[in-house]
Structures are given as C-alpha cells and as structure tokens.
Image: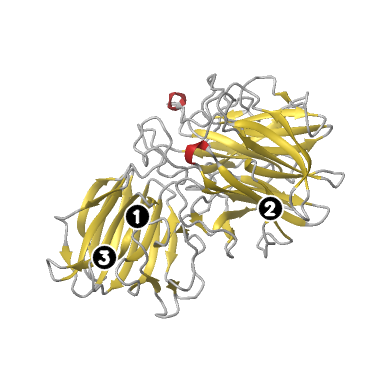
Amino acid sequence: MTMIQNPVIPGMAPDPSIIRVGETFYIATSTFHWTPGVQIFESTDLANWTLIDQVLKNGEINLQGTNTPAGIWAPHLSYDEATGRYWLAYSHMLNMAGREFNSDSYAMWATDIRGPWSEPIYLTSIGFDPAIFHDEDGKHYVSILEWESRTGYQAPGHIVIAEVDLENGGIIGDWHRVTQGFTTRGAAEAPQIYKRDDYYYLLIAAGGTGYGHGVEIGRSKNVFGPYEAHPSGEPIITSSPQHLFSLGDPDAGQFQMYNPNSVMQKAGHGSLVQTQTGEWYIAHLMSRPLPDTTLNPLGRETSLQKMAWTADGWLQMADGSNLAKMEVPGMTGVEFENTASEDINETFDSETIDNHFMTPYRDQTAAWLNTTENPGHMRIYGGNSFFSQMQPSIMATRATSFVYDVETAVTFQPDHYSETAGLGLYYDANNWFYARLYKSESLGTTTLSVLQAKLGERVEYVFNKVPMPEGHVELRMHYDFGRATISYRRNANEEWTVLVAGIDVAYLSDEGVNGEPGEIGGFTGLFNFIGSVDAHQHDSFADFDYYSVKNN
C-alpha cells in the first residue's frame, strides 16, 4: 500500500476544506491578509496537490489596514449536485480589538472550480467560520460560530445552525444554538455538517488553534439538534491525546499540550471527504515546530488522516487512535508517487506569472506590477515602507520547508535614501528581514545592506554595506532552521560573497511575532519575497530578472 506523506500542502495552508467531485479532490485554505484571497488546490490521488487558483481576485475584498491575523478566514467548499454548483463560504474578519470580533461572512458560487465565481452573497455577521450544507430535500443550511463577547458567558460562544437563502442571501428563520463543544477542550469553532444514513454529523474544531487543537464530532437525527457527543469524550484527531479541560478559554496557545513525541503539532480544524473507493479521510491543519522549540515558522499546514466508521456509526481514525500521523495509508488500489514539488523557477518571460505569488494587504494590479514594460523582467514600482499595512509593493511565496535557497537578480537606480529594492523574508508589517539596494548618502552611491523589522522595531545592519554603483546585484538567501544567510554577486561569473551569516530569524513564526511567550501571535507563517519601496515620490521601480526557490 502506498503511503501519503504529511503535510500534503506544506507552508501556509490552514483551515483546509476538502471536497470530491467525480474523481478529483479540491481543498480551499485561508489567506488572511494576503491577496489574492482563498487558495484552491487540486489532486487526484490525495498525496500530490497543485495550486490551481485563488478565488478572491476581482476586487471582492479590501484588506488594506488589516491587522495580523485578521482578513479572510476559514473558507468552506461544498458542491451542490442538484444544481452542479461549487459553493465557497468564507469570513472576512475586519476587527479583533477588544475581543469584539467584527466579521462578515459571504458565499459565492461557480459552475467550474476555476471560475468565474459569482459576486459575494452576504450571509451573516454573527461570528466566523461559516460552512454550507446542501440537504437531500433541497434545503441549504449554514453552520457557524456565534462569537461571544459578553462578560460571564462561556467563550468563544455557541455553534449555531440556520437555514440559508443562497439565491438572495441571509438567513431563513432563527439561528439554533446546538453546542459549545463535544469535549472539555472548549474553543469550539469551524462547524461542518455531513449526513450519513439517518444521522447529521457535526464536525468542529476545538481547543484553540494552538497545541491543544483537535477535531471533535457529534451527531443528531435532526439538523438543528440536539447533538450527542462522540462517546470517547475526546477529540477524534489531535496531536496531543492527553486530557485537557479548557472550557471558557477562547483561543489560547495551550503550550503545555506540546507533544514531544510527535513531529506533527496543533492537528485540528478538520474537513471530511469520502473517496470514490468508498474510503474516508479528514483534511486538517497542523504545524511543524523548529527542533527543540515551540516556534512554527511555516505556519499552519494541511495534512490528511484516514478515517473509518464504527459498527455503531461513529467516526474515528482508521488505526483506532486519535493521534494524528505524519504518514497515512493512501486510497485502496490507487498507486502514486509523492512527486509534488514546492520549488519555484520564475523567469518572467510571459505576462502570466507563477500563481504562488501573493501580496500582503493590497491587490496585485498593473498600476505597480507588470512584466510588459521590460519583457523578461518583473517590474515592481516602489510602494509604502514594508512597515505599512496599506500599499507595500511585495511579491511573495509561501515558505514550505526548513532548509531552502531563494535567489533573484535586481536592477535598481534609486535617487533617494527611502527608495529600496531587494529580497527577503516576510511575516507581516512588523516582522521581516530584507537585503536591499538603496541610495547611501554617506557612500554617495547605490549600496547593498540589510534592514530588519523585529516586533515593530527597525534594525539596520550599519556595518554590512557594499557599494553597488552599477545598481545591479544577484541575491541569494539561504534559510536553515530559523537562521538566514544573505549572499550576493554582481554577475553570474562571480563567486557568491556572504553579506550576513546565520542571522536568527526564528521569531518570524506564528509564536514569535508578538513577543509574548505563551501566546500565539499570528496564523499565517513565513513568506519569501521580492519587493520595492519608494517613500519619496512613488515613481521609482525595480526590475527583477528571475525568482527561484530551491527546497532542500
């Protein structure tokens, strides 16, 4: 039997929602403050996944000013066989201050998973993590977390279900509160409804999106409940099987639940699918910390677990445990090789660029980005400082392994010290690491140096400066388990020269970006990027000859 190697989608790919249409599987994942919004991946064997599209790319959302980790949360895919429509539900988290989570949820549909998609249809603002269920009688239901902000009430709230009007938007009738969780882990969220035989099954995430995360399940013969909990009283999938009582804790890191015996941590937020072979799998998020730490620079990734139904109609992992595994059996009779590669080699020789490129906070438009003005190059017009949550000019790809090299060649002629261009690592507006060309007034020429943002503080490497009067340089960044080395050369005939070596960038991780031990600072993981800044006149540009990522 061929085994599936987890994670099946490495790097930032959290909150996976999986469906099957025919013999093809699709997964949608969250994108938060990154555009285009909502990644869609495709597979025919469950082991090898390809990014085929992003959905929110036509002005449906405005993410400018979005604080980490707000933005686009928990997309849910479904397929309505009666109409042949794919449905996508998602939340746009607008505010998290004061625990007054302001989130608007929408649905969109398409007859082809690659679009075009409909305009967003408003659903509700009651909470977040909506999911749509298409019942056999033609009715449609939405399940969601009703966010609780009142003092004295159990946080984070109730899972609620209502009938939904998918043609006109909005809710039909009343919301029905059905549960606050099926175990004592609390922090119930991400509810998804499935039907098998006579039962409606409600799959939920629990324990907070940290080290106590898990997948729980309950069932009822009525879609509005009451739902009975799985008889084990524990999650059916988790990385930390020990018992946890955390009722009322809305979303803590639960670092005490770190499992030193598992490579995989934080397994939770699951989505269920039946294969064409009659087997069952759950796609779920997970993380892989740097060795001997609880820091997760790759963010929350997507993995799969094989499931089975018991004789009395309960879902459990196929091996009878609830501990998520890094390797799981593939579909019966389906042979495959694990051939998926996350390497990138983009030469910018066409108007269409690699679809892995994403941008924080702003849309990718021809106003600041193109491959036509200087064919064979990506031209990026300088935007705001990278501390900005409004208009940074950044093109980035997800970091997907602990050891890799990123390379580019950039040509740039700045005429002011606030104009820069180069290559780096990016988590959010307060946390990044950047090797850049800029105009040095003290050296009187274009210069290569390093700039860093650490927890919102600006750190300049003033003793690592190299004049580059020709305004052209090749840059290589080597990332190795949380440390970064930047090398440069003036042309391909030269040997690489180290600019800075072994810089500690492990803080560019979900746990490292807020400076508060014991808490999760972000959800989004690390990105590699090329970009340009012009805080002078917004008229300078940089030309990038290529962009490559080689994972080791």
Q: Which residue is rendered at x = 43% and y = 45% of the image?
A: 298
- Spot occupied by residue 52 in the image (x, y as percentages of width and height): 59, 60
Which residue is identified by label 1? 387
Q: Which residue is rendered at x = 82% and y = 29% of the image?
A: 221
For label 3, the SS is loop
Amino acid at circle 2? Tyr
Q: Which residue is rendered at x = 43% and y = 67% of the image?
A: 346
- Spot occupied by residue 160 in the image (x, y as percentages of width and height): 70, 35
Q: How is the image coloured?
A: secondary structure
Question: Badge 3: how crowded within 10 Å, few (<14), some, or many (20+)?
Answer: some
Which residue is identified by label 3? 418
Residue 552 is at least partly visible in this image: no
Question: Badge 1: how crowded within 10 Å, few (<14), some, or many (20+)?
Answer: some
For label 1, the SS is loop
Amino acid at circle 3? Ser
Q: Earlier in the sequence, mark 2 or mark 1?
A: 2
* 9, above or below 286, in the image: below
Amino acid at circle 1? Phe
Indicate the quadrant where residue 468 lies: bottom left
Q: Earlier in the sequence, mark 3 or mark 2?
A: 2
- Spot occupied by residue 227 in the image (x, y as percentages of width and height): 75, 26
Which residue is identified by label 2? 122
Q: State the separation of the CA atoms marked 2 and 1.
A: 32 Å
Indicate the quadrant where residue 518 lies: top left
Q: Nearer the viewer, residue 513 or 211?
A: 513
Q: State the separation of the CA atoms marked 3 and 1.
A: 13 Å
* 327, above or below 134, in the image: above
